[in-house]
Each structure stands twice: as C-alpha cells, then as structure tokens.
Image: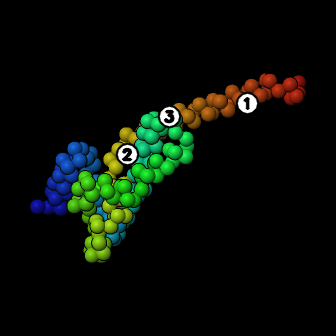
C-alpha cells in the first residue's frame, strides 16, 4: 500500500470514527503531523499553524455557545466558563475519549518521550483537527464585515451629526 493509499485509508477511518468526511486529505495529514515528525520528514512546521487556528476557532465557538446559552452571565462568568472548556486538560480528555490519538503522526523522539500520552500533544492534536474552520471562519468574517460596516456607518453618521449639531462650530468658513 502506498503512502497516499495509507493516508486516504487513515482519513476514511478517522472520518468514520468522528462521523465526519474530511474534504482535504492533505490538510488532514498536516493536522495529524506533530512538528517532530515534520522535522524528521525534511522540515516544515507540522500541525502548529492549524493548532493555532483551531485554538482560536474553538474559543470562538465555545464563547458563542456560552453567550447564547447563558444570557444572565457576566463577562467574567463567560470567560471562566470558556477557560474551563478550552484548555489543555479538557481538550486532551476529549481527544482521548474520541480515540484520535492513534492517528497522530509523531516523530521518533516525541514517541519515545511519551507521545500521545502527553496532555499537550493530545490537546494540540484536537485543536489542529477542528474541521469547522471553513464554516466558522466564514461566519466570523461575515459578522466582522457587518460589524465593521455598522461601525463605519455609525462613525460617519456620528461625524455628520456632531458637525450639524455642534453649534460652536463656525459653518460659515
């Protein structure tokens, strides 16, 4: 079996385990590749950048869910609840419960050093595998555009109102 066939089989097996179909097998392989393995294979960062993005997406998703589910909570309550959900321990527990550790592509040194038994390795894998990027990032971008447009409009309207309403400004010059 070729490396490409093994990769496709792994993507199908992981997809079946999670009840999800991964659209981009190359991106999935990157998400599964620990930096130690990427280094052994000739360089690259492995899943570090996807981990970074996954952390942000998970934070956004959890924040939005908490915000909607708990309208009576203060900002502090929401922040503490999000931190309780989006942290290394919790993410590692979810990765372990889902059984995704067996798909991790680790370097020899990382494997000998404990590999997927390490909380941080599992948490990073979970973050890198967040395949909700496309949808969530698109939603966030749309919300940001709407907010930006509203803020720009409010700023323009505010400037117009202050210009027209401010009697101390000499409009004759």
The residue indicated by pointer 3 is 71
* Residue 63 image offset from top left, x and y in percent: 46, 43
Residue 126 drawn above or below residue 45: above
Residue lying at 55% horizontally and 34% vertically, measured from the top left:
147
Q: Earlier in the sequence, mark 1 or mark 3?
A: 3
Residue lying at 51% horizontally and 48% vertically, measured from the top left:
79
Q: Earlier in the sequence, mark 2 or mark 1?
A: 2
Residue lying at 30% horizontally and 62% vertically, measured from the top left:
33
The residue indicated by pointer 2 is 133
Camera-side mark, 2 or 3 = 3
Asked which quadrant contains residue 157, the reply is: top right
For the N terminus, the quadrant is bottom left
Q: Nearer the viewer, residue 77 or 134?
A: 77
Q: Is residue 56 left or right of residue 125?
A: right
Q: Earlier in the sequence, mark 2 or mark 3?
A: 3
Q: Which mark is residue 159?
A: 1
Q: Is residue 74 left or right of residue 126?
A: right
Number of other residues with Cα within 10 Å of mark 1, as a class: few under 14, some 14 to 19, many 20 or more? few
Marks 2 and 3, Cα distance to the nearest angstrom? 26 Å
* Residue 125 image offset from top left, x and y in percent: 33, 58
In the image, farthest residue toward the left = 1
Residue lying at 41% horizontally and 48% vertically, measured from the top left:
58
């Amino acid at each position: 079996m070729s490396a490409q066939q093994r990769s496709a089989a792994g993507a199908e097996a992981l997809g079946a385990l999670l009840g999800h179909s991964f659209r981009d097998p190359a991106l999935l392989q990157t998400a599964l590749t620990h930096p130690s393995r990427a280094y052994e294979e000739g360089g690259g960062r492995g899943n570090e950048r996807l981990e970074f993005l996954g952390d942000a997406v998970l934070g956004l998703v959890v924040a939005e869910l908490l915000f909607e589910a708990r309208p009576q909570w203060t900002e502090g309550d929401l922040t503490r609840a999000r931190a309780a959900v989006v942290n290394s321990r919790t993410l590692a527990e979810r990765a372990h419960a889902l059984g995704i550790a067996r798909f991790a592509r680790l370097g020899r040194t990382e494997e000998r050093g404990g590999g997927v038994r390490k909380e941080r390795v599992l948490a990073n894998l979970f973050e890198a595998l967040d395949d909700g990027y496309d949808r969530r990032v698109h939603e966030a971008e749309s919300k940001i555009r709407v907010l930006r447009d509203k803020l720009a409009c409010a700023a323009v309207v505010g400037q117009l109102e202050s210009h027209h309403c401010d009697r101390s400004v000499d409009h004759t010059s």
